[in-house]
Image (cartoon, rainbow, N blue to C red):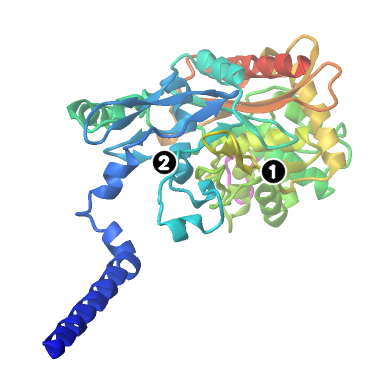
Amino acid sequence: MTRCIRRAAALCLVLLVALLVNAARVQVFEADRLDGNPGNRRPVLARYAAPRGNILVDGQPVTGSKDTGEILRYERTYTDGPLYAPVTGYASQTYGTTLIEDAEDALLSGTSPLLAPLPLWSDVSRTTRRPAGNVATTIRGALQQAAFRSLAGRRGAVAAVEPSSGRVLALVSSPSYEPGLLSGTGSEAATAWARLNTAATRPMLNRALHETYPPGSTFKIVTAAAALDAGVVTDVDAPTGVPDPYVLPGTRTALPNAATGCADASLAYAIRWSCNTVMAALGVRTGERRMLETARSFGFNDPDLRIPSRVARSNVDTGMSPDQLALSSIGQYDTKATPLQMAMVAAAVANGGDVAHPYLVDSTTTADGGLVRQTMRRSYGRAMTPSTALRLRKLMVDVVERGSGGNAAIEGAEVGGKTGTAQHGVGNHGTPYAWFIGWARAEGAARPAVAVAVVVEDAAARREEISGGGSAAPIARAVMEAAVSLDGKG
């Protein structure tokens, strides 16, 4: 009898050890594979079992969560969805996440290890979810609203940054969409998805970050910076010796001017009235190497720029012939830029030549307000010398006070700017894109409050009115007025 009991006990011990070994295999070694199995519904159910963290503007949430009572319990909601869609993106139970909802998804969904009370707590406790954290953006609501209201549904975009820090103050794409329509899993979400993705106006395209446009004459600021730093121009008021018309090197093609008085014009006059001939010739004299170096220092040709959402690569071609370089120097040929990139150009001038790395997330916190991460200022690089930046600031102020950018002037503030048009379409017969880049400094302020870039695709104006700032400059003025007002209030 005793022998049988011993054998039974040994067998039970073997079975217990086997059970423990199998449990360890499943819970430790096989856990990740099983969690990632498409047939495992538990992670999906857990993801939507609690409210999602919020995205904040001016300290107030512009997102929320609603209890649907369904299996996937909580759906994302948005306050002023179309206004902030280019910032928040969407969080959909069907179509995934985009923009901040995607870049900060781990924190907003409560899965980030940074939310754990102690290091390695998740590995020890096997707890994968905690109360979701919140994301505070750098967006200022007054600037966002001014840009959105001024675009008034026209196709285009606005990007505004604080020159000294790189904080993104406004990011608007128009026309926009309601991201809350995509939050659920029902037929309404599917219908909205199909409608938005087939709309001719492409409302889900983030034109401020993901669309690139020929920057036209606004790129002349980059060309001027390269020419001044290279010593090609030493006196901005001296004649440049460039004829009007200017024949593109190696061709018989004469480059026209929309402005008058461009023959043998100075750099100051060429910037004030946007002379194509002078700026194209200066780009050729500066040379492709120096032009590319300067463009790269502003942010062009960078495929890895993130804010933290991905930003499309702005382009200046390499290996260009002299005639192609001439056209690139006035923002044509294959030169393309996002509105955010051109805001960085204006910001570099306003900030003494130093380009602050743009960023959209100011800080992240736990559900109870504990700081998880604070974004610190980073320098992207130096685009030009401080002396060149000072001269360009004066030239851009001259554009607003005496030249083509008068519609951007703000009483009681110093405003610098550059207007532009960009030809496109077959044979350049499309309605030109209207551009304006600029910056503004409040009276008595130590430094500019904002740098802004505006592009309007469907500018309802004659070409000469567009090049004079008729479409884009008033939008920029509204944004800069809001920034100057906030800066004046401290």
Q: Which mark is residue 109?
A: 2
Q: Position of residue 347 (x, y in %)?
A: 71, 34
Query: Is 127 left or right of 45, judged from the image as shown?
Result: right
Comparing 401 with 107, the one in front is 107
Q: Position of residue 122 (x, y in %)?
A: 46, 55
| Residue 253 among those drawn in magenta | yes
Secondary structure under tag 1 reads loop
Query: Is 87 left or right of 362, judged from the image as shown?
Result: left
Can you tell which quarter of the image residue 358 is in? Answer: top right
Secondary structure under tag 2 reads helix
Amino acid, disc 2? Ser
Q: Which mark is residue 376?
A: 1
Residue range in magenta is 247-255
In this rendering, the count of numbered labels is 2
Q: Position of residue 279 (x, y in %)?
A: 70, 38
Mark 1 or 2, closer to the camera: 2
* Residue at the image point whose x is 77% and y is 32% from the top: 350
Comparing 204 with 326, the one in front is 204
Amino acid, disc 1? Met
Query: Is 241 left or right of 279, judged from the image as shown?
Result: right
| Residue 250 among those drawn in magenta | yes
- Crowd rating for badge 1 (residues with CA inside 10 Å; few <14, some 14–19, many 20+): few
Comparing 417 with 241, the one in front is 417
Q: Which mark is residue 272?
A: none
Quadrant where the image shows the C terminus:
top right
Name of the residue lying farthest toward the bottom: 3
The first of marks 1 and 2 along the sequence is: 2
Can you tell which quarter of the image residue 355 is in? Answer: top right
